[in-house]
Image: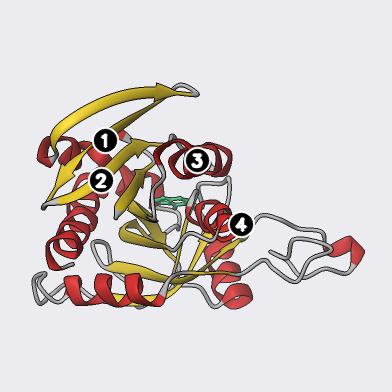
Amino acid sequence: MRIGIIGAMDEEIALYVEAMEQTTQTVKAGITYYAGVMEGKEVVLCKSGVGKVNAAVTTQILIDQFQVDRVIFTGVAGAVHPDLNIGDIVVSTDCVQHDIDVSPLGFAPGQIPFTEQWIWSANSDLIQQAIDAGKELDAGVQVVSGRILSGDQFVASREKVQWLHEQFQALCTEMEGASVGQVCAMNGIPFVVVRSMSDKADGSAHVNFTEFTKLASERSYAIVRNMLKAT
Ligand code: ADE
């Protein structure tokens, strides 16, 4: 079994780079892929860069060139559900692209036109493994599962975040997960997204993101490391 692990930014993959052993590096399409071993498991780690196109290309390369059997996305997100706090964890049950909008042609926001498929379900075993791994975190940290939104937008307004919550019944928003989910689904590869909240996607999001990305990245890493250890 070979596991692909993707983060979008340096902070989100730094702890993995430190923890991995027997690492070899390969550059493809400008992205560095670190193949090696972590917690006794064969892993290919990479930093996709931010946004859905980067994440999609990276995921397809992980599948085609590195033959990963499953993909875990690790990193930070903006909380959309009002009960979530900075540092809390969301495990994806499914992912939706919130910024695709063909509503003038009668499609729902988020719907990819002319297809029934636009909600990308994560793998139930990986979801359960992530939730179980979360039980080992400090008691104060909420670990919940639910819908994760992705869009090529850093969401930083109360109105927008309320709309996202009402429209999509989502828990958090970020910029890559749904494109990873779509590419995995197109290739029949199981995936899960594990995100820790760096901000609340409101008017303070830019300040909080800067302050809490390191903490949130550590939390997401702790869960994924526990998942690898336990499986
Ligand atoms: N990642 C972390 N916080 C985010 C936000 N507010 N919007 C989009 N992506 C994010």
Name the amino acid type tagged 1. Answer: Ala
Q: Is residue 26 above or below residue 92?
A: above
Query: Label 1 crowding class (10 Å Cα cut-off): few <14, some 14-19, many 20+?
Result: many
Mark found first going from the N terminus, 1 or 3:
1
Residue highlighted by disc 1? 35
Q: Residue at x 48, y 55 (%)?
A: 177
Residue highlighted by disc 2? 43
Mark found first going from the N terminus, 2 or 3:
2
Q: Residue at x 52, y 36 (%)?
A: 54
Residue 80, percent across and down?
45, 68
Residue 62, percent across and down?
43, 41
User: Is 101 in front, or is 123?
Assistant: 123
- SS type, badge 1: strand
Q: Is residue 123 above or below residue 29?
A: below
Residue highlighted by disc 3? 64
- SS type, badge 2: strand
- Nearer mark to the viewer, of 2 and 3: 3
Q: Are marks 2 and 1 in contact (CB under 8 Å)?
A: yes
Which quadrant, please, contains the N terminus? Answer: bottom left
From the viewer's perspective, is 228 left or right of 72?
Answer: left
Q: Is residue 76 above or below residue 140?
A: above
Name the amino acid type tagged 4. Answer: Met
